[in-house]
Image (tube, grey):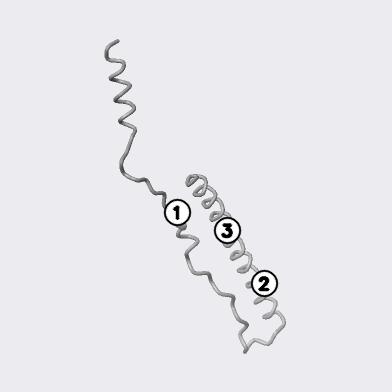
Amino acid sequence: MNKFPLIILILLTACSTNVPVTAKFPQVPPSLMEPSEGLVPLDPNKRELTDLFDNVAENYGRYHILEEKYSAWQFWYEQQKKIFEGIQK
């Protein structure tokens, strides 16, 4: 029973720190930092309507890939910002 106050004292002092703890904002995932592929311009030598449709279809697909990547970036950033601000308060 005499050791009980000593154990409590050790437990309470072991949890304290004199070093200030600073939270850092999380790093961006590398997949979101890769440069995006640009849209493909139409070759001026191709004058067929099918070439135009092929170009439009390819650029449409690339646009949707970029849109998903951008949306993922926004979602990740907002979630990390909420977590970071929640820790700071």
Inter-mark Cα distance, 3 to 1:
15 Å
The type of residue carrying mark 1 is Phe
Q: Secondary structure at mark 2?
A: helix
Quadrant location of the N terminus in the rendered image: top left
Q: Which mark is residue 14?
A: none
Mark 1 secondary-structure assignment: loop
Cα–Cα span, label 3 and label 2: 26 Å
Q: Position of residue 5 (x, y in %)?
A: 31, 17
Q: Residue at x 68, y 80 (%)?
A: 52
Q: Which sits in the foreground, 42 or 84?
A: 84
| Residue bearing mark 1 | 25
Mark positioned earlier in the residue sequence (3 or 2): 2
Q: Position of residue 40 (x, y in %)?
A: 59, 77
Q: CA distance from mark 1 to mark 2?
A: 39 Å
- Judging depth in this view, the residue of 31 and 12 nearest the camera is 12
Q: Quadrant of residue 63?
A: bottom right
Q: Which residue is mark 3?
A: 74
Q: Residues within 10 Å of mark 3 (few under 14, many from 20)?
A: few
Q: Give, as a three-letter code, the residue at label 2.
A: Ala
Vertical position of residue 67 compared to residue 16: above or below: below
Quarter-wise, where is residue 65 in the image? bottom right
Viewer-nearest of discs 1 and 2: 1
> Mark 3 belongs to which amino acid?
Gln
Comparing 85 with 2, the one in front is: 2
Eye-nearest disc, 3 or 2: 3
Say whether disc 3 or disc 1 marks the residue closer to the N-terminus: 1
Q: Secondary structure at mark 3?
A: helix
Residue 60 location, x and y as percent? 66, 70
Q: Residue at x 67, y 80 (%)?
A: 51
Residue corresponding to mark 2: 57
Is 45 drawn above or below residue 77 in the view shown?
below
